[in-house]
Image (cartoon, rainbow, N blue to C red):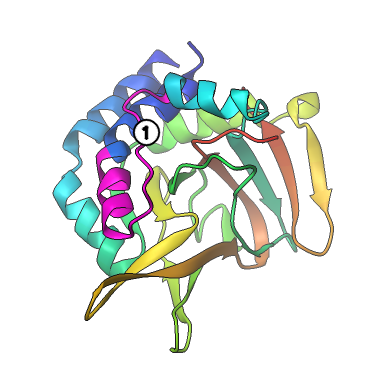
Amino acid sequence: MRENIQQFTAGLEAINWQHMASQLGENGFSLTQRMLQPQACQKLSQLYGHGQRFRSTINMDLANISILITL
Amino acid sequence: MPVIQTMRESLNSDLVAIANHWSKLANLGVVWRGQLSEFLQTNAAAGQVRPTPLMLNYQQGDYNCLHQDKYGEHYFPFQAQMLLSEPGQDFEGGEFTLVENRPRQQSRVSVVPLQQGQVLIFPNQFGLKKSTRGFNRTQIRHGVSTITAGNRTCLELIFHDAI
């Protein structure tokens, strides 16, 4: 997981915050570059994404998704 | 420290300056502090003690209606979503959508071209719209359209905690 944090930290350092601030103001959102490589994404979703770690499944009018509290 | 909390703290500290700038423009009278731990202590004092970072797993037919993630008096005005699946490969549909309700105007919709590993930053309460007298606040809600095939996993980083 240390690798994930390194990739994420490097991604944060690459962000142009001025640009992000103006995008948030103009577009209402801002997208970063890819901050985690596909393999890291898969690892992360596998680590947290299986079995009883899932706290609950929301199933109501608003949403229909499986949710996991990660902390 | 768990990887998710590390991500949450570092991203938050970078967003605080933008949040405080918006607070000034919108005359909120709120100042967010540089350290997430301090902010979370304030949350806890108001009963917001439940952690909010989520891993969401959408399967075929799943969706998330337009909403705002506000879980108590204290909130941080931006949140983040990192997509862990690859659109078109791992799933179809499931577009992240933002709707901005503007005073005396039709609502504006944005469909975000979020790719695997990218982080989307968006306002979870209000947007700002320039007016002759300064800035007006708009209402921003977000949701995810129905997944038509496959599996969409994402990490949602909300910076305030919940009651």
Is B124 or B157 nearer to us in this picture? B124
B137 relative to A64, above or below: below
On whether residue B26 falls in the magenta region, the answer is: yes
Question: Which residue is situated farthest in the bottom direction here?
Answer: B105
- Image quarter for residue B147? bottom right
Is B48 or B9 nearer to us in this picture? B48
Quick one: label 1, few (<14), some, or many (20+) residues within 10 Å? many
Under circle 1, the secondary element is: helix
Quarter of the C terminus of chain B within the rendering: top right
Position of residue B124 measured from the top left corner of the image (x, y, whole percent): 49, 54
Position of residue A43 measured from the top left corner of the image (x, y, whole percent): 52, 27
Q: Is residue A25 in view?
A: yes
On whether residue A6 falls in the magenta region, the answer is: no
Residue appearing at x 28%, y 26% in the figure: A9
Residue appearing at x 40%, y 42% in the figure: B117
Position of residue B154 measured from the top left corner of the image (x, y, whole percent): 55, 44
Is B145 situated left or right of B80 in this image? right
* Magenta segment: B17-36
- Which residue carries the number 1 mark? B12
Residue appearing at x 27%, y 63% in the figure: A25
Chain at tag 1: B
Is B92 or A26 nearer to us in this picture? A26
Position of residue B34 measured from the top left corner of the image (x, y, whole percent): 31, 27
Question: Which residue is situated farthest in the top direction here?
Answer: B1
Q: Is residue B94 in view?
A: no
Is B56 or B77 nearer to us in this picture? B77
